[in-house]
Image (spheres, helix red, strand yellow):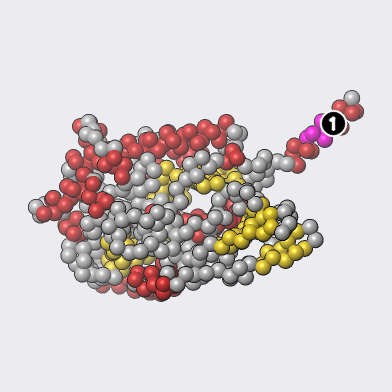
């Protein structure tokens, strides 16, 4: 009997000694969506799985993208830096595969920041997390080969070691702008009649039909999210997994996507924490650049000083939201904005062209075709006519509380001079601190492409130590990795001795530089 008790005690200690201590973190990321969800007062899409997350978590009411298009926004998510700081603000600046389908005349270039820039998942991996991305990257820059344990359509937390904490990202394209015309069909009169359009749109059934399509796309998204949640529960991981649901920028429609108005940058965010929250809603200001430091905070990792974001985990330190628009595929519209909890100031850097840009890709949408035709017939309301105007005011000031759709420009109203001057000062302070925010893109390209010369990394040094090696990068602000020859995955070098066996290779990564591989053969 005594022997049996000792055996049970040993088993209990062994099991609990290997119990995972750090939480798992899961991101469920949809594309091109504003607040078209029941949690934000729009009940036309049936979303039982997203509803479950909100019922068990917190709905965040003030979550903002730094850009109203995906590639610049995703660059800020993965680095915790503003695109205008690291040089990723122009949509489709970097392309993995060269093509001209968007009629872009600029050469492809990867950002070469002045400051240290690191994909934050490298830090998670260095601290024991298994990091997976399934599967969209689109960071508008060359991806770090050290960022993910897996980045593919089959990437999954299931491939980690036993009790290893994971950070997993699942990206869903079912709500992308292209799905509006890709899934286009004529919906029923009953469905169309339920749609309430924003006040800047004409009350038109063709536009409402596109909105119904978007709601249907959201329902497909919800079904896919449900499958991930079921898998988590089947793996007994649901309770110890913090789940983020959010969109990569605002909605798919004109004056939403590519727009610096709230319709383009204000996004849904729902977080199911691993503990029951005290409150169901949160109205603090949160920017995309705050995601990286928040995850590092949650995982008990040190946040690098260079990261511009602020963790919002158990704290509320953000006073302003900043965002920028620049080139959208083949057209540029340089605008900057600052937003407090009550007011928003927009700076239009080019006042001699319309806000509306005839982006070829968007012209496939029925809503866009209709707006164009109504504009030609002079049948749009004042707000949409302003969108098409051949000029724009240098400044736009909006009372967000009383005018959430940003219809009435208060710039020039003496009553708001104090608000305007305060926001202007803060906006220019931010703008001037952004390394590439005021730089012409052609100048940027010349700098990024090193005036026609390649950015070359120095070769690393290898120091032989008993039973292993130490690696010296010889490159400022770079990431270093290694692996045994023939292995698929790079390990991140943590400064300690590595024992790689006979043949191995190292890798050095720095944004904007050619990746450097170096092979070593011990028996030669």
Report the residue at 27% width, 51% height from top.
361
Report the residue at 31% width, 56% height from top.
100
Give the magenta-colored segment's residue range.
Answer: 8-12
Instruction: Tell me the quarter of the picture where residue 175 sits.
Output: top left
Instruction: Tell me the quarter of the picture where residue 392 sits.
Output: bottom left
The percent coordinates of residue 41 (x first, y second) are 35, 42
Classify mark 1: residues with Cα within 10 Å, few (<14), some (14-19) or many (20+): few
Q: Is residue 407 in view from this perspective?
A: no
Q: What element carries label 1?
A: helix
Answer whether residue 471 is magenta in the image.
Answer: no
Instruction: Tell me the quarter of the picture where residue 109 sits.
Output: bottom left
Tell me the quadrant of the picture where the N terminus can be found: top right
The percent coordinates of residue 184 (x first, y second) are 26, 38
Tell me the quadrant of the picture where the C terminus can be found: bottom right
Q: Which residue appears farthest toward the left when viewing the image?
A: 377
What residue did someone put label 1 on?
7
Tell whether 70 sits left or right of 297. Answer: left
Q: Is residue 362 in view from this perspective?
A: yes
Q: Which residue appears farthest toward the top when viewing the image?
A: 1
Q: In this view, does 179 lie above or below 291?
A: above
Report the residue at 29% width, 63% height from top.
105
Report the residue at 21% width, 63% height from top.
354
Q: In this view, does 292 lie above or below 209?
A: below
């Amino acid at each position: 009997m005594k022997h049996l008790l000792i055996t049970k005690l040993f088993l209990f200690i062994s099991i609990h000694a290997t119990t995972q201590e750090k939480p798992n973190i899961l991101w469920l990321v949809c594309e091109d969506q504003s607040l078209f969800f029941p949690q934000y007062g729009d009940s036309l899409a049936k979303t039982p799985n997203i509803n479950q997350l909100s019922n068990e978590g917190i709905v965040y009411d003030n979550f903002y993208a730094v850009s109203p298009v995906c590639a610049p926004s995703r660059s800020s998510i993965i680095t915790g830096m503003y695109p205008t700081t690291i040089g990723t603000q122009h949509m489709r600046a970097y392309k993995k595969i060269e093509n001209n389908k968007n009629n872009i005349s600029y050469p492809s270039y990867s950002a070469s920041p002045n400051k240290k820039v690191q994909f934050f998942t490298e830090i998670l991996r260095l601290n024991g997390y298994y990091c997976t991305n399934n599967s969209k990257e689109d960071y508008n820059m060359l991806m770090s080969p050290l960022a993910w344990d897996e980045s593919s359509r089959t990437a999954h937390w299931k491939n980690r070691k036993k009790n290893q904490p994971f950070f997993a990202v699942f990206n869903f394209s079912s709500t992308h702008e292209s799905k509006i015309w890709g899934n286009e069909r004529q919906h029923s009169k009953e469905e169309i009649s339920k749609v309430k359009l924003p006040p800047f749109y004409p009350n038109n059934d063709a536009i409402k039909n596109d909105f119904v399509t978007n709601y249907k796309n959201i329902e497909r998204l919800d079904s896919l999210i449900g499958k991930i949640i079921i898998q988590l529960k089947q793996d007994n991981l649901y309770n110890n997994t913090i789940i983020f649901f959010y969109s990569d920028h605002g909605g798919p429609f004109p004056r939403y996507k590519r727009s610096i108005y709230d319709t383009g940058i204000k996004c849904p965010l729902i977080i199911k924490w691993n503990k029951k929250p005290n409150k169901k809603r949160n109205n603090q200001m949160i920017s995309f650049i705050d995601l990286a430091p928040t995850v590092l905070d949650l995982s008990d990792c040190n946040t690098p000083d260079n990261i511009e974001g602020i963790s919002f985990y158990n704290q509320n330190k953000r006073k302003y939201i900043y965002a920028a628009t620049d080139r959208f595929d083949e057209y540029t519209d340089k605008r900057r904005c600052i937003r407090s909890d009550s007011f928003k100031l927009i700076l239009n850097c080019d006042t001699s062209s319309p806000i509306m840009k005839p982006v070829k890709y968007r012209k496939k949408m029925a809503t866009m075709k209709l707006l164009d035709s109504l504009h030609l017939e002079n049948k749009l309301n004042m707000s949409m006519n302003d969108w098409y105007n051949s000029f724009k005011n240098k400044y736009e000031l909006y009372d967000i509380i009383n005018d959430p759709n940003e219809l009435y420009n208060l710039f020039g109203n003496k009553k708001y001079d104090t608000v305007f001057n305060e926001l202007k000062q803060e906006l220019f302070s931010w703008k001037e601190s952004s390394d590439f925010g005021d730089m012409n893109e052609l100048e940027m390209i010349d700098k990024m492409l090193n005036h026609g010369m390649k950015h070359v990394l120095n070769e690393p040094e290898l120091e032989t130590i008993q039973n292993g090696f130490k690696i010296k990068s010889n490159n400022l602000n770079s990431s270093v990795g290694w692996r045994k020859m023939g292995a698929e995955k790079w390990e991140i070098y943590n400064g300690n001795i590595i024992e790689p066996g006979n043949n191995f290779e190292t890798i050095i990564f720095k944004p904007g530089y050619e990746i450097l591989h170096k092979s070593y053969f011990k028996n030669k």
